[in-house]
Image (cartoon, rainbow, N blue to C red):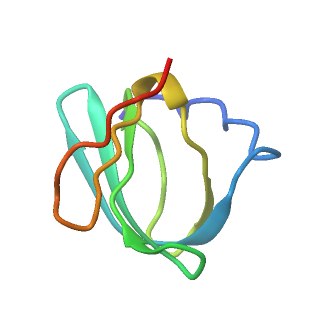
Amino acid sequence: MAAPAPRTDVSSAFAFGPVIVVEQLGGDTFLRVDAPEVGTTTPRTSGIRVVCKGETVGLTVDPAQSRLFDAAGDAVTRRA
């Protein structure tokens, strides 16, 4: 197994919650996180991350990499 990746600075995290599922797929790691601030969500991290079920993680968003959708499921257009 790969060495643990350095933890990301979570000082800018907007939500925290326990990991309930960890799934490593190729070069990405998908987590299922139950964060009270946003509900259950599935963040993707690049690379192999050593994260354990039950570990509390902070959620951050890179605006350049995010996609937003409205209640109908339609993509929200970014404003310049």
**Which of the pair 70/40 is nearer the observer?**
70
Q: Decide if residue 70 is on the left or right side of residue 55.
A: left
Answer with the quarter of the image where residue 21 lies: bottom left
Kindly tell me whether residue 20 is visible in this rendering. Answer: no
* Residue at the (17%, 50%) spot, across then down: 74
Residue 32: x percent and y percent? 35, 66
Answer with the quarter of the image where residue 48 lies: top left
In this view, the residue farthest toward the top is: 80
In this rendering, is residue 2 above or below 30? above
Kindly tell me whether residue 60 is visible in this rendering. Answer: yes
**Which of the pair 43/24 is nearer the observer?**
43
Q: Decide if residue 75 is on the left or right side of residue 56.
A: left
* Residue at the (44%, 70%) spot, across then down: 53
**Which of the pair 23/32 is nearer the observer?**
32
* Residue at the (41%, 29%) spot, across then down: 78
Q: Decide if residue 49 is on the left or right side of residue 14.
A: left
**Which of the pair 1/28 is nearer the observer?**
28
In this rendering, is residue 67 above or below 40? above
Residue 34: x percent and y percent? 46, 77
Q: Decide if residue 56 is on the left or right side of residue 12.
A: left
Residue 20: x percent and y percent? 39, 75
In this view, the residue farthest toward the front is: 79
